[in-house]
Amino acid sequence: MDSRSALFSFPDPYDLEGSRSLFLQAIEENVRFHYNACPEYRKIAQARGFSPHPLQTERELAELPILPTILFKRHDLRSMEGKKLLITATSSGTGGTPISIQFDMGGLFCGLRMVLRLGRYHHFFSPIPTNYIVMGYKPRRDNHTAAVKTAFGATLFTPAIRRRYALLYRDGKYVPDLDGVIQAIVSYSQSSLPTRFMGFPSYTYFVLHRMEEQGITVKLKPGSKIMLGGGWKQFYAQQVDKKALYALAKRVLDLSEKDFIEFFGAVEHPILYCSCPNHHFHIPVYSRVIIRDVHTLQPLPYGCPGLVNLITPMVKGAPLTSVMTDDLGVLHEPNSCGCGIPAPWLELLGRVGLKGLKTCAAGAAELLSEVKL
Ligand SMILES: [Zn+2]
């Protein structure tokens, strides 16, 4: 087994110390692979005077060639060609410049192992058939966006008996159907089975807000959950206050704070970050996060806000080893959360130059403005 597969099979998904040497080895292998297979990556590395070498400490991860995510918007960077590539994932279904990333078969298997392990750790799986409200786009054959896949994929954690989508494709475009969703919620609440919500936080907020305005309250069955993902960025872009959302869900659906699960991930860094009981995103063994000074790009200590640099050896199809996002965040010290997970946790603060940069979720919010709330 290569070190990448070994890392993604590591038993405890939050034991960063125990898996450190495996992680460093997997990174070295991944860097060496891209260096040899992707001419653009090699050029960037050489310009920095970098050549692949064994890594002794995590500190050395800061020296890896960093590719800004914007590069993937403008260039189709690949380290593999043809049949070895299994799937193309694309970000941003609405607005903005989409990013297409090539995933290799081995990387996908790693992703699958990661989702199974994290799903088990965070108790996402349930054998009980479940009603689903998907706060996102109904999949179409020609819509390959990651948000669609994520939202649909999450409905596989339990057997899905029904799925109702918030965004329907009508007359050549997606339109929000909030009233249809509310009707589905009311009907699901009368069934004997739990209901799970999955998708953009903004839709969840708008739907619950609308229910409250109309005086509609329901009591969902035990085991019901609200899973927020795909559009995590507008928690700050639209300032949906999480505490307000938890309180609203309590009043309208009789769900409590512990019934919320949040995810974050990105096409250019396909690692699944899941919220802990304190709603923090701990770093799993599959990745590392470096926070960098906005001006000098120097690594910053725990607790200091800066640009978020994401590192993982998961993908061989494209050189995603170390990518620089345009997001601002803070990395909090190990053992500082209080939930029992020792790994450091990442707090997202916002986006640099929000103007002109549209996320998938922000595009969805634009669609929503067509609906009178
Ligand atoms: Zn925690």
Image: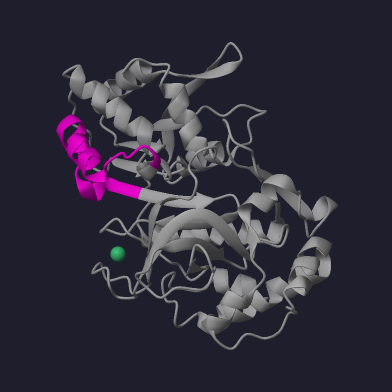
At horizontal 76% and vertical 52% (from top left) the residue drawn is 85
Report if residue 255 lies within the magenta region: yes
Determine the image quadrant of residue 55.
bottom right
Q: Regarding ligand 1, which quadrant of the image does it lie in? A: bottom left
Report if residue 151 lies within the magenta region: no
At horizontal 53% and vertical 64% (from top left) the residue drawn is 309
Report the quarter where the N terminus lies: bottom right
Residue occupying the far front of the picture:
295
Q: Where's residue 366, x and y in %?
A: 46, 26
Q: Is residue 331 left or right of residue 244?
A: right
Determine the image quadrant of residue 212.
top left
> Vertically, is 351 above or below 344?
above
Q: Is residue 198 left or right of residue 67?
A: left
Report the quarter where the C terminus lies: top left
Q: Is residue 188 left or right of residue 51?
A: left
Determine the image quadrant of residue 43.
bottom right
Q: Which residues are magenta?
A: 237-261
Overall secondary structure of the magenta stretch?
Answer: helix
Q: Where's residue 301, x and y in %?
A: 41, 75
